[in-house]
Image: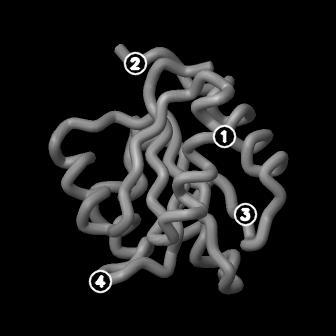
Amino acid sequence: MAERPVLLVEDDDVLRGALADALRRRGVATVQASSMEEAAGMVEGGLRPGLVFLDLNLPGRSGWDLLRTVLAPAPGRPPVVLLTAQGVDPTRLRQFAVDGYLPKPFALSTFLDTAQRFLASDPEPG
């Protein structure tokens, strides 16, 4: 899998921790953020994730705000997979060039398969 870490942006501490642990057991480095602001600060500070799992309903500013700012569609942006319990209009997914969508609740195996699929296609940074 890729050298660059997975960024997990999820405000549910238990879920975020379980997902991070599952990725680590597969040898995938992870970085965790519990808010849009925390994730934005990491990316602005130089974090270059290979994949981002992004919850939309976050305290403070939403996941959509992260997609409007530091994760706006641009060359070199990592794949972004939304994790959300709310329905999402396909037009919005296209507007923000979202690469995937996992509706909550999802099976851990589905999450891991999704991560593996995107990380396997991640080009080496350079």
**Residue of label 3:** 102
Q: In the figure, is residue 77 to the left or right of 107?
A: left
**Residue of label 4:** 60
Q: How many marks?
A: 4
In the displayed structure, would residue 83 be above or below residue 47? below
| Nearer to us in this view, 46 or 21 | 21
In the displayed structure, would residue 27 be above or below residue 107? above
Q: Residue furthest left?
A: 45
Residue density around tag 3, few if under 14, some if 14–19, many if 20 or more, within 10 Å: some
Q: In the figure, is residue 103 to the left or right of 10?
A: right
Q: N-terminal of the two: label 1 or label 4?
A: 1
> What amino acid type should be assigned to the residue bearing mark 2?
Pro
Q: Residue at x 62, y 66 (%)?
A: 83
Q: Residue at x 45, y 59 (%)?
A: 9
Q: In the figure, is residue 60 to the left or right of 84?
A: left
> What amino acid type should be assigned to the residue bearing mark 1?
Ala
In the displayed structure, would residue 78 be above or below residue 110? above
Q: Nearer the viewer, mark 4 or mark 2?
A: 4
Q: Secondary structure at mark 3?
A: strand
CA distance separating discs 4 and 3: 22 Å
**Residue of label 1:** 22
Of the 4 image quadrants, the one containing the N terminus is: top right
Q: Which mark is residue 125?
A: 2
